Image (cartoon, helix red, strand yellow):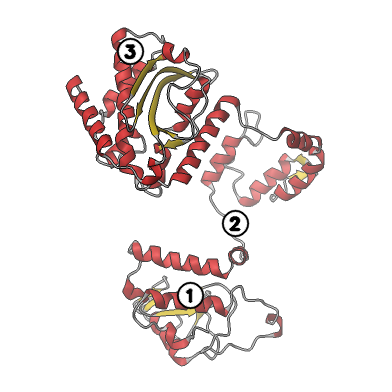
Amino acid sequence: MNRHERRCVRAQLRQIGEAAELPSVLRRFRSIWAVDFEFQTDPITGRVWPVCMVAIEFYSGKELLLWRDQLLSLRDAPFDTGDDSLLLCFQAVAELSNFLELSWKLPRHICDLYAEHRTQTNGTNPPYGNGLLGALALRGLAHINAGEKEDMRQLVLRPSRSWSPDEIHAILQYCRTDVEALIALLPAMASAIQLSPALLRGRYGAAVARMEREGIPIDVRLYQAFMENWETFRPELIREADMCGVYEGTTFKMLLFANYLASRGILAGWQRTPTGLLATDDDTFLGQIELHRHQPFDRSSLTRWRQRLGEEHIVALLQESLSVAHRTGAIDTKDLERVAIDTTVQEKAIASRQKVPIDLPRQPHQRMRKLMISSRGRRNRSSCRSSRGWLIGSPTANLAVEGITNRPKRESQTARKPACSPGFLAKSITLLRSNHRDRSIASEFFTDD
C-alpha cells in the first residue's frame, strides 16, 4: 500500500468516525480518547518498553503523536483520564501496561474493543480472526493489509532499538492508522455495547496489566496460616484425592501405581524414565489422558445433577434445548406435532421383540401403548425419534400422572423418591403446547394440574 492509498484509508476511517452518531450511554463522556502504543517486550523481565504513542480524541479530532523521549518526559497522560473521559483501545492489557511502565495514572473508564468484539462474536468462528484487522473486516471497514502491518511490526521490534527519522515517521503513521481504525470501529460496534459490563471488562484489563507487571496478588496472612497447618490438611486432602489407591498414608507408592495401571490395561504403554521407573511428570499424564479418554460413569450422577438444578431450571433447560434444536434445524415443527412423555428410559422388550427405550406401567392407557409401539414400527432404528414425533424421557421412577395408571409398587420400592414431580412434567407439557399451535398427543393424556 503506497502513501496515497494509506491516506485514502485514513480519510475513509475519519469520515466514518465523524459522521457516526453514538448511543446516549457513550455520549455521557465529554471526551473519548482512542489510544495505541507501539512497544517492545523485555525477554527477561517481561515488561514493556514503550516506543511511541498516538492518541486521537473522538469528538474534536485532536491528535497526539509522541515518540519515546517525549513519553518519558511526561509525568502523566497528556489527555484527560478522569470521570468525564473514556479511554478507547484494542487489547487494554497491552496499552495499560505502557501506562504503568511510564508511571501514569490509569484511566478511570476503559472500553476495550477487543473484549467487546469477542463478546459480540462469542460462540462463532469469525472468518477474519479476532485481531484488529479481523474486527474491521467483519464490519466492512478498510485498513492496511496484513503484510504491511507485519512489516511495520518487525520494524518496531528491531533489536537495536534505533531508527532513522524516516523510520520514526513511518512508525508513528502506522500507529496512527490503528487509532483511526478504533475511531471508525466504535460507531460500528456501539449499538451492541452494554456500557456497564464493558467498563467492568476494562477494569479487569487494568487488573491483569498490574498482575503481569507485579505478580498475582495473594492473601499473605491466609497463605501463611495455610502453610503453618499444611501437615494437618495434607492427610485429608490425600484421602479425598486418592481415588486410585496409590498412597499409603501420605506416601505415594510406585508399586501401587503400577498395579493400578495394570488393572486398567495401560501399564505396557506407560512411559518410563531412563532408569526404568514409571514416569510421573505432567507431560506424561497429559499424554495418557489424550490416549485414554474414558470418562467414568456413575449411575447416580445424573440424579444428583438434576436435584441440584431443581424443577424450574430443568424446565428452562428443556425449553432452551427445544428452542436451539428448532433454530438449528435439528428438529422441525412437524416433529413436535405429537409428543409422548414417559418417566423412565431403559431398554425393555415388548411384543414385537424390538427394544424400546421406555418402561411403561403394566396397565397403561391402550392408546398410549399403541402410540409407543407404532412409533417404533420400523426395525433397526436406534434413535428415539420417529415419524410420529419425539419420545422424551427422564431417567427417574415411574410417576402417577392423571391418565396413566401406575403399577403397584413393591415394598422395596415404596421408599424410592422420584427425582422430579408431576409438576415438572405438567410444566414441560404446557411449554410444548405453547410453542406449537397444533394439538399434541400429550394433551390427550395429561392435564395441566
Question: For the residue labelled by badge 1, is the local secondary structure a helix, a strand or a loop?
Answer: helix
Report whether 293 appears left or right of 62.
Answer: right
- First in sequence, mark 3 or 2: give its number: 3
User: 49 or 396: nearer the eye?
Assistant: 49
Query: Residue 53, percent across and down?
Result: 39, 21
User: Label 2 is placed on what type of residue?
Assistant: Pro
Badge 1 is on which residue? Answer: 428
- Quadrant including the N terminus: top left
Contact between labelled residues 3 and 1, with CB atoms less than 8 Å apart: no
Residue under the point 42% across and 71% down: 382
Q: Quadrant of residue 136?
A: top left
Figure disc tally = 3
Query: Residue 260, percent across and down?
Result: 67, 48
Q: Would you call the spot at circle 3 few (<14 residues within 10 Å), some (14-19), or many (20 or more)? A: some
Viewer-nearest of labels 3 and 2?
3
Gap in Å between the C-alphas at discs 3 and 2?
Answer: 60 Å
Question: For the residue labelled by badge 3, is the local secondary structure a helix, a strand or a loop?
Answer: helix
User: Label 1 is placed on what type of residue?
Assistant: Ser
Report whether 280 appears left or right of 347.
Answer: right
Badge 3 is on which residue? Answer: 168
Gap in Å between the C-alphas at discs 1 and 3?
Answer: 67 Å
Query: Residue 417, percent across and down?
Result: 66, 76
- First in sequence, mark 1 or 3: give its number: 3
Viewer-nearest of labels 2 and 1?
1
